[in-house]
Image (cartoon, rainbow, N blue to C red):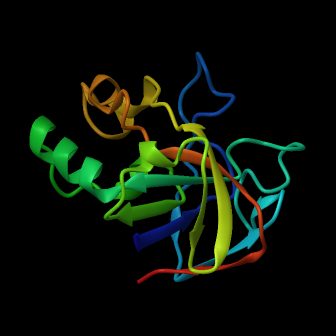
Amino acid sequence: MRLLHLYISSAHNYFGHHGQPAGREPMVEIEEIQCVAGKGIKGDRFFDFKNDFKGQITFFANETYERLCEQLGESGRSSSVFRRNVITQGVDLNTLIGKEFEVQGVRFIGTQEAAPCHWMNEAFAEGAERALRGFGGLRARILTDGILKRE
């Protein structure tokens, strides 16, 4: 698995905004992220969110991003619009649900799909929510401390 992009955001744009306009807090691309076991990513909006939170870190496949761009005729939008922390290449993220895995020496357990919501239509393009069903990425818990670096 290659790590193409690493993102954090200090606040939520969609979470807790149902029925209201989306927030405008940007995703910030960084060279490395500090993973803290059982807590999340330092500096991210979900850090120490709640005990045993299933989405301490999120992964999204670049292959899905490229397919979606082609399918919906979009170009020039960053993969950051999906608000996932790690953009990967070379792995089927759905195969990691319910499994422990390691990336750059850091251990994780895949907890569930990071299901797309209706905001994806606004953030990326009309039809994105439907096209992402089953391919919304991976939510995971962090099992060991460590640093992930963009490759």
Q: Is residue 74 above or below residue 44?
A: above
Whole-percent x, y for residue 43 in the image: 73, 67
Image quadrant of residue 119? Answer: top left
- The residue drawn where x is 83% and y is 58% is 39
Quarter of the image for the C terminus: give it: bottom left
Image quadrant of residue 68? Answer: top left
Q: Is residue 9 above or below residue 2?
A: above
Q: Compare residues 18 and 99 and report the one nearer the observer.
A: 99
Among all residues in the image, which is located at the extreme top?
Answer: 19
Whole-percent x, y for residue 135 in the image: 36, 37
Any part of residue 151 in sight: yes
Among all residues in the image, which is located at the extreme right?
Answer: 51
Q: Compare residues 144 and 60 and report the one nearer the observer.
A: 144
Q: Compare residues 90 and 61 and report the one nearer the observer.
A: 90
Left or right side of 19 for 94: left
- The residue drawn where x is 54% and y is 27% is 21
Q: Compare residues 102 and 136 and report the one nearer the observer.
A: 102
Left or right side of 99 for 54: right
Whole-percent x, y for residue 65 in the image: 27, 50
Image quadrant of residue 13? Answer: top right
- The residue drawn where x is 45% and y is 31% is 116
Q: Is residue 106 above or below residue 76?
A: below
- The residue drawn where x is 39% and y is 63% is 88
Quarter of the image for the N terminus: give it: bottom left
Left or right side of 31 for 126: left
